[in-house]
């Protein structure tokens, strides 16, 4: 592994842990407040800590993600410092970096400006370049034993395609908002939702391309598959903790939301972890 990738990954992991700990535990004993958004609707702000000027729903999701980010970042440091000689280390590191890149993108683009903005920016930049450099390095190497390429991996390919299509659930929020012109259900005090952009604009096409590539036995598809399945596993874990924190904040989720947005992603995460484990066993 190049030293630049190693150092960028370490800085990205450490800053991720720091910002997540602050997000979870810092408090200034503030209280919830209610504001009116541009659509004339009342929105409750959390009012306390580093996420004081964010809505309750956003804070629940962000704090839940913070818990997982600490786990992922620590695991990334272990992979870099203690497991670097393992055959699967670089592939696993790329997947863990993709999770940190996803979360840091949501912080710099989706969370209202606060005192940690420069930390968010530093971790986003470090993780972005570490991930890009590592992935470009992996794509030109032969990362798996030759017998893997003799396998069709139809099940994994189908899973990636189905998993990619699962993010189309966001269209049930987006399309009605476009038709009505008032995105009341999700926009709250924000301008847009980064998750929609990342999932529909990046994750969806990558999952489809990787799934189709596996069916055609393209070597690059095997690498993308491990990265994406590590990311999906982390997302499944995030959804669990996001739901727990949101419930603690008094946010009531409807049955349809629990099934469509929680249970489905948790199941996808479990399947992704299992399939990824089987794939990483063939790391060269």
Image (cartoon, helix red, strand yellow):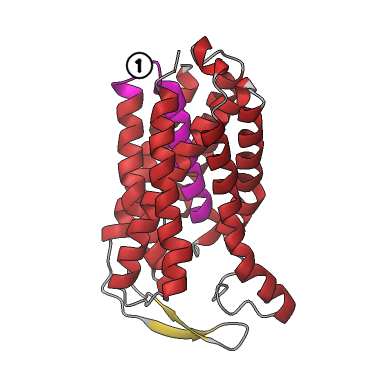
Q: Quadrant of residue 114?
A: bottom left
For residue 114, say whether it is visible: no
For residue 73, say whether it is visible: yes
Q: Percent x, y for residue 73?
A: 35, 39
Is 82 contained in the magenta span?
yes
Relative placement, left or right, of 114 versus 213 is left
Is 99 contained in the magenta span?
yes
Q: Percent x, y for residue 65?
A: 38, 54
Q: Which residues are magenta?
A: 80-107
Q: Quadrant of residue 57?
A: bottom left
Name which residue lies at 57% across and 40% down: 158
Name which residue lies at 61% across and 70% down: 173
Q: Is residue 167 above or below residue 112?
A: above
Residue situated in front as seen by the camera: 81 or 233: 233
Name which residue lies at 57% across and 70% down: 190
Residue situated in front as seen by the camera: 222 or 238: 222
Q: Is residue 85 above or below residue 52?
A: above
Relative placement, left or right, of 16 versus 157 is left
Residue situated in front as seen by the camera: 69 or 3: 69
Q: Which residue is mark 1?
A: 86
- Say what secondary structure mark 1 lies in: loop
Q: In which quadrant of the rendered image does the C terminus lie?
A: top left
Q: Quadrant of residue 189?
A: bottom right
- Main secondary-structure element of the magenta-colored stretch: helix
Name which residue lies at 56% across and 17% down: 149
């Amino acid at each position: 592994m190049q030293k630049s990738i190693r150092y960028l990954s370490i800085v990205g992991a450490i800053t991720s842990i720091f910002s997540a700990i602050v997000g979870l535990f810092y408090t200034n004993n503030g209280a919830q407040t209610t504001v009116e958004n541009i659509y004339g609707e009342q929105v409750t702000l959390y009012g306390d800590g580093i996420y004081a000027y964010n809505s309750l729903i956003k804070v629940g999701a962000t704090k839940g993600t913070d818990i997982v980010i600490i786990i992922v970042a620590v695991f990334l440091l272990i992979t870099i410092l203690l497991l670097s000689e393992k055959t699967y280390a670089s592939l696993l590191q790329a997947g863990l970096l993709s999770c940190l890149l996803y979360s840091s993108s949501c912080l710099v683009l989706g969370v209202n400006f606060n005192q940690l903005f420069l930390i968010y920016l530093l971790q986003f930049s470090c993780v972005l370049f570490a991930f890009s450099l590592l992935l470009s390095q992996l794509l030109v190497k032969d990362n798996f034993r030759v017998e893997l390429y003799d396998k069709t991996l139809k099940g994994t390919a189908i899973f990636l395609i189905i998993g990619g299509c699962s993010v189309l659930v966001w269209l049930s929020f987006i399309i009605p908002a476009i038709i009505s012109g008032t995105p009341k259900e999700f926009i709250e005090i924000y301008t847009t939702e980064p998750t929609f952009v990342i999932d529909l604009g990046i994750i969806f096409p990558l999952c489809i391309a990787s799934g189709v590539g596996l069916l055609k036995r393209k070597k690059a598809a095997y690498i993308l598959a491990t990265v994406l399945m590590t990311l999906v596993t982390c997302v499944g874990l995030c959804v669990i903790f996001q739901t727990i924190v949101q419930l603690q904040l008094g946010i009531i989720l409807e049955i349809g939301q629990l099934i469509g947005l929680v249970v489905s992603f948790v199941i996808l995460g479990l399947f992704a972890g299992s399939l990824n484990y089987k794939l990483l066993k063939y790391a060269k």
